Image (cartoon, helix red, strand yellow):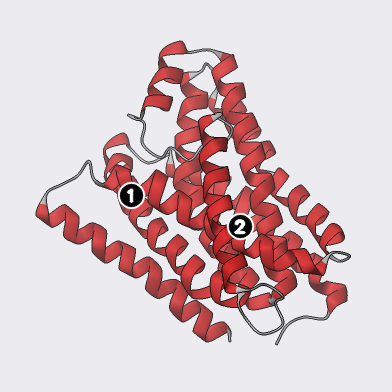
Amino acid sequence: MSPPIESLLGWIIVFSLIGGIFSAIAAAVFLLFPDRIRTAMLPHFVSFAIGALLGAAFLALIPHTLSTGSGIEFHQLGLTLLIGILGFFLMEKLVLWRHCHEHACEGHTLTEQQHSHAAGTLVLIGDGIHNLVDGVLIAAAFMTDFHLGVITTLAVAAHEIPQEVGDFAILLSSGYSKRKAFLFNVLASVTTVIGAVVAYFSLRHAQEAVPYILAIAASSFIYIAVADLIPGLHKHVAFRETLRQIALIIAGIVVIYFAHATLH
């Protein structure tokens, strides 16, 4: 049963905190593990995140967008998904969207070699914009259906943790102390709440826009999973590692499926 509308904003704030600040804190804790353990575990988190993102997009967001009374037709949904994917591609090209989860990727290698606060600042700006959009997506999901909001938050948190680990590492390599890197990473995560609150008050008077925002959320999750995360898995081609990746991707999908079924 969904909560009354007067308490919805409170729930949106709580879950946007989980999707943003909690992920930053969890990433900081993860960095306390020895390098060997962290290096071994991170690809497993990424595989699980892929499943969670794809599950949330195809099993929750898109079906809800097409549900009766949503006001969006299948053709409009397809067009919105395509525009969203292209938009995220362009944003990533402009270095505003940072979803690189591998320290060896080109973007991270360049910033690690520079060792400058300017590189760390760029990461924080990109992370803040990314989290702001995540907050908007979480709020739109909650305003459609409370359970959909929970599923969306789970998917956001699943991919945020490995991303925050990568961003945290860049800040450290850019000359930030561990304390400052943690503080600034948490501050950048606060934009999730800001985006959620702004979206709540804006979308209350523009309900017809909510289905399109849900479609954008789905395109975001699909793009992150397919364009940013899956290519990293192809660096590990051993048969046993491939089986492990497939199992963890399926596990992410299964978690979203049962969470969605249970909440409903």
- At x 77% / y 48%, what residue is drawn? 194
- At x 46% / y 61%, what residue is drawn? 53
Q: Is residue 220 above or below residue 177?
A: below
Instruction: Work out whether mark 2 precedes mark 1 in sequence or the reverse, and give the earlier one.
Output: 2
Tag 1: Cα neighbours inside 10 Å, few (<14), some, or many (≥20)?
Answer: some
Tell me the amino acid under the disc marked 2: Ile
**Is 13 left or right of 33, judged from the image as shown?**
right
Q: Is residue 18 above or below residue 89?
A: below
Q: Secondary structure at mark 1?
A: helix
Q: Is residue 208 above or below residue 137?
A: below
The residue mark sitting in front, 2 or 1, is: 2
Q: Which residue is mark 2?
A: 216
Tell me, for residue 34, which label it has, or none.
none
Which residue is more in the foreground, 89 or 76?
76
- At x 57% / y 59%, what residue is drawn? 79
Quadrant location of the C terminus in the rendered image: bottom right
